[in-house]
Structure formats: structure tokens, C-alpha cells
Amino acid sequence: MITLTLLHPIKSTPIQSWKFDNESVIRIGRATDNNVVLYSAVVSRHHVELRRVGLQWKIINLGTNGTYLKGSPITQVTAEDGVIFSLARSGPQIQIHLAKSKSKVSADSQKLPSDIPVPETDADTVTAEDVTKPIPLPQTSLEPEVGKKGYRS
């Protein structure tokens, strides 16, 4: 399972999450045929693709404005749990959470009593089946305006 979390552009706090259990390819962009639809001027119609390759996930840039990892543009990288990538230099940030393989469940966790209640999922968590409409993003930019203090040409 892979969970994608859209982060607030300034606070880096979660805004919304999507969980995918069985998909081998997840597409993110402005077009409505993507698994995750984000409306932002810097996001391409088909901006980034996450592709499962064996037990790993690859982040593949498809966007005109690029996909960035730790401030550097990427074409394709292997995703690690907790990694944050940006759609365009100052665009939406998405964090990846990778679930541990079921084959790696510890023996201690299997000894838990079966009558322990399982908590419901968070209201902010959305499964792939729940995604039905695009999410508008705030029109904020981390780039200073021309003429403002701190602008470099």
C-alpha cells in the first residue's frame, strides 16, 4: 500500500491524503483522468507518475515545469518512505508513505488479542475509490515578486 499526502505550501502540514492498495501506476496532474487531480497553474495535465517496480516505487517526472526532490529536478528516482517531492519548483508538495510488506509482520504483533477494536480511518484520508473531484490549491508562491526585497535576477 502507498499513501500520498498533499502538504500545506507553507506549514508543510497534511491537507489531504490518498491511499492506494492495488494500483501499479498512480498518475498525478491537472487532468481529470489522473488518480490524483490537483489544480495549480504550475502543475501539468499529466505531471508525475508513480510506478511500482517489484517491491519499490519509482517517481517519474512527466511535467513541463519539472518534479523536484530536495530542491533538485529529477527525471526518475526510487521513492523512499517519508520522501517529499514537489510538482514544479514552488508547486504542490506531496509526501509518500510506503506500507511495510505483510510478510515482514513481527511475531509480537501476531500475538495481539483479536478483540482489540480497530480504529476507523481518519476523515482526512481518502481511498482511490473516493477520489471523485479535483482539489483546488491555494494560489501561493514561494518565489518573491519582482521589485520586492529579496528578489534576485
Image (cartoon, rainbow, N blue to C red):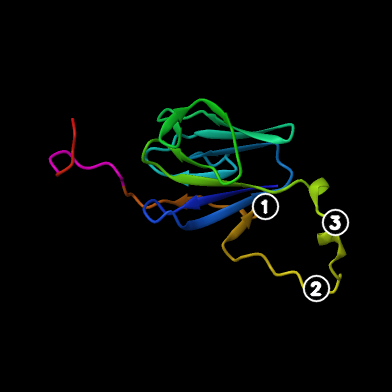
Mark linked to residue 18? none
Residue tagged 2: 116
Q: Secondary structure at mark 2?
A: loop
Q: Is residue 145 magenta?
A: yes
Residue tagged 1: 129
Residue tagged 3: 107
At x 53%, y 47%, the residue is 95
Mark 2, residues whose alpha carbon is within 10 Å: few (<14), some, or many (≥20)? Answer: few
Q: Is residue 93 above or below residue 120?
A: above
- The part of the chain drawn in magenta is 141-148
Mark whose residue sits in front, 2 or 3: 3
Q: Residue furthest top?
A: 75
Mark earlier in primary sequence (2, 3): 3
At x 76%, y 46%, the residue is 101
Q: Secondary structure at mark 1?
A: helix
Q: Position of residue 148 (x, y in %)?
A: 14, 44
At x 41%, y 51%, the residue is 137
